Amino acid sequence: MHTGVRRDAFAAQRRRMVERLAKAGIGVPRVWAALEAVPRHLLVPEALQVQAYSDSALPIGDGQTISAPGSVALMSSALALEGGERVLEIGTGSGYQAAVLSRLAGEVISVERLPGLAARARRALDTLGVANVVVYLGDGSLGRPADAPFDAILVTAGAPAIPRPLLEQLAAGGRLVAPIGAREEQRLVRVRRGGEGFTREDLGRCRFVDLVGANGWAA
């Protein structure tokens, strides 16, 4: 358990992190508040806690990373959540993105393909008192048809194309945000489902770990 001084130090670091994002125009106020509330240092390996509030991805084991706060701010804001929505997250990882989404939506369903990460993320979310996130073990490129449709879908790993099952599980008026492209570099895209089909918007260059699965990259 951290001492009061250390907790205050991390709180100050979180505030500074959010101030940097706000100054750079990355995200929206509602998302900044969620980022300031979620203790990212508790979702990274203990040896890396001193780096928790830098704007960088950090390794979390199993060849995976925790997304940089700037990426989390951008992607979360792109979903345009107002509260009450059902969100599907593909790639639980450390649980950080899910913890942020838990403060922005009504329910978060997260799918992770690696058993060790899924178990650690669930323990971490329980420790943080996050009650509206459910973590499932499975192939995220297939989505979660049993719980569809979803008001928003967030994919936290890069794929060569948007998996068709995810588009099919998106509710009318819903938004999907995903990194799409080559393994070395992707474009972050936002897809909206309207009455006449899907519209697609490019949100800029990015780089994520591979989305491995039937509708992603081979393992």
Image (tube, rainbow, N blue to C red):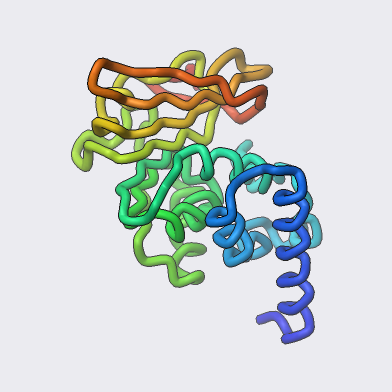
Between 33 and 167, the one nearer to me in the picture = 33
The quarter of the image holding the N terminus is: bottom right
Residue 2 in view:
yes
* The image quarter in which residue 61 lies: top right
Looking at this view, name the residue that lies furthest to the bottom.
4
Left or right placement of residue 103 versus residue 214 in this view: right
Q: Position of residue 152 (x, y in %)?
A: 36, 39
| Residue located 62% across and 17% down the image | 183
How many numbered marks, from 0 up?
0
| Residue located 52% across and 23% down the image | 189
Q: Is residue 206 above or below residue 50?
A: above
| Residue located 35% across and 37% down the image | 138
Between 24 and 179, the one nearer to me in the picture = 24
| Residue located 32% across and 34% down the image | 174
Left or right placement of residue 43 versus residue 92 in this view: right
Looking at this view, name the residue that lies furthest to the left.
146
Residue 215 in view:
no
Between 194 and 105, the one nearer to me in the picture = 194
Left or right placement of residue 128 versus residue 215 in this view: right
* The image quarter in which residue 46 lies: bottom right
Q: Is residue 155 above or below residue 25?
A: above
Q: Position of residue 144 (x, y in %)?
A: 28, 36
Q: Is residue 84 above or below residue 207?
A: below
Q: Position of residue 193 (x, y in %)?
A: 31, 25
